[in-house]
Image: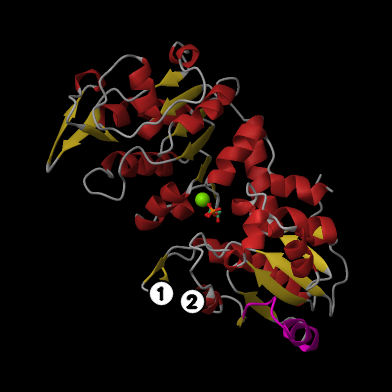
Amino acid sequence: MIPSVRDIGDVRGKRVLVRADLNVPIVSDVPADDFRLQRIVPTLSFLREKGARILVVSHHSDRGQSLQPVANRLSGYVPVSFAGDVLVGGFLETLRKSAEGSVFVGENLRFHSGEEKNDLFFGKQLASLGDFFVNDDFAVSHRAHASVVTVPTLLPSFAGISFMEELEHLNDMFDPPHPFLFILGGGKAGTKLPLVKKFLAIADHIFIGGAPANNFFQGLGYEIGRSLADEPNIDILPLLKNPKIILPEDVVVSSGDTNRVTFPTQVVPEEKISDAGPKTIALLQPFIQEAHLILWNGPLGEYEREPFDAGSVELARSIAESGVRAVVGGGDTVALLGRIQLVHKFSFVSTAGGAMLQFLTDGTLPGIEALKK
Ligand code: 3PG
Ligand code: MG
C-alpha cells in the first residue's frame, strides 16, 4: 500500500513539494497539449483547499527547455506563479512568506545534472524546500531520478490523486475481466516482447501491430524491407506459436511517394511497413465487440503521417463505439486520440508511456517503491 495525499492530514501553512509532469510537447514556445496539465489539477486544488504552500517541481525531456511557458499555461487551470530556479538563494523565504494556498512552479529539474544522476546532495537540497512530498507524476516514476526516488526517502511522502488513479486502473490489468484483449503497437519493438510474454498468461488475445509486429514477421522469416524493428531481447520463437497472438493480416507498405496494401509475406526490400491494412482492422472487430476489457498501447503505424494513420484511427473509432471498458496509454496513442477528439470516449487514458509499459512488465516502478519506504 502506498500512502495517498487524501490522507496527508493537516497541512495548513505547510510547504508541500509536488512532483508533477509538465513534460508536454512545446511548439514555438507554446504547450501543444494540455492533457497532462489537466491531470494535476485535482491534487493542486486539494492541497490549496487545505491551505498548503505548494511548490510544483517537474522536468522537461528537453534539458534546455524552460518550464515557464508550461507554468503560464497551467495558470489557466490553477493560479500559479513561475519561480525560476528554486535552488538558488531566497526562494525558500518566498515560499515561507507566501499566502496559504499559493502555488509556485520551479524550473526544469534537468537543468541540474544531479536530478538525472540521482545525486544525494541535490535530492537533499530539493527536499529542504518542503515539509511534505507528493508524487503526482506516475509517468516519470520509471526514472530513478532524485525528485522521484530520493526526495520521498527524506520527507513524509504521498501519492497524488492522478497517481493513485493510474495505479488503480493499471493494477486491474493483472486480474482482468475476460475476455481481455491487449493491443500493442508503437515503436521500440524488441523491448516490448517481455511484456507480450507476461500478458500471454493474463490476456485472452494479444493483437500485435506497429514495430513489434515486424519482429514477429522477421521471426516467421518474412522480408520486412526498411520497416522499423530492433533486436528482440528475448527468444521470440515460443511466442510465435502461441494461438493467443493475432498479427496483421494485411499491411500498408510505402516506398518513396507510393504505397500499397499487401500481405505481410509480400513485402519487398525497398518497402516499409507503415500501417495495418483494412482486412486487419475488420479482423479485429469481433475481438473488440466480445471483450470485457481492452488495453491499448501504441499506434499501429506511422500515425503522424497521412494516410498511415488510417489503421490506428479506425481502431480507435471501433473501440470508442463498442462501449467496452478500454484503458489506453502511451504518448503517441494519446496524441492520436487527442487529434481525433476521442480521449473522453475511453474509460481511462494514462498519462504515461514508458512508465506504463514498465509497470505492466514489472508490476511496480522505482517511484512507487520509493513511496513505500
Ligand atoms: C515521459 O514523458 O515519458 C515522462 O515525462 C518521462 O520523461 P523522459 O522520457 O524524458 O524521462
Ligand atoms: Mg518518455
Q: Is residue 95 magenta?
A: yes
Q: Is residue 161 magenta?
A: no
Colour mode of the rendering: secondary structure
Quarter of the picture for ligand 1?
bottom right
Residue 4 is labelled as none
Q: Residues within 10 Å of mark 2 (few under 14, many from 20)?
A: some
From this viewpoint, is residue 7 visible? no
Quadrant of res 18: bottom right
- Residue drawn at the location 70% of the way across and 74% of the way down: 55
342, above or below 215, in the image: below
Give, as a three-letter code, the residue at label 1: Asp
Name the residue at the left extreme. Answer: 258
Q: Which residue is mark 1?
A: 29
> Which sits earlier in the primary sequence, circle 1 or circle 2?
1
Measuring from the top left, give residue 180's x and y in whole percent: 54, 28
Q: Which residue is mark 2?
A: 69
| 289 sits left or right of 86 in the view | left
Measuring from the top left, give residue 171's x and y in whole percent: 67, 38
From this viewpoint, is residue 208 visible? yes
Q: Are marks 1 and 2 in contact (CB under 8 Å)?
A: yes
Q: Which residues are magenta?
A: 84-98
Give, as a three-letter code, the residue at label 2: Pro
Quadrant of res 107: bottom right
130, above or below 261, in the image: below
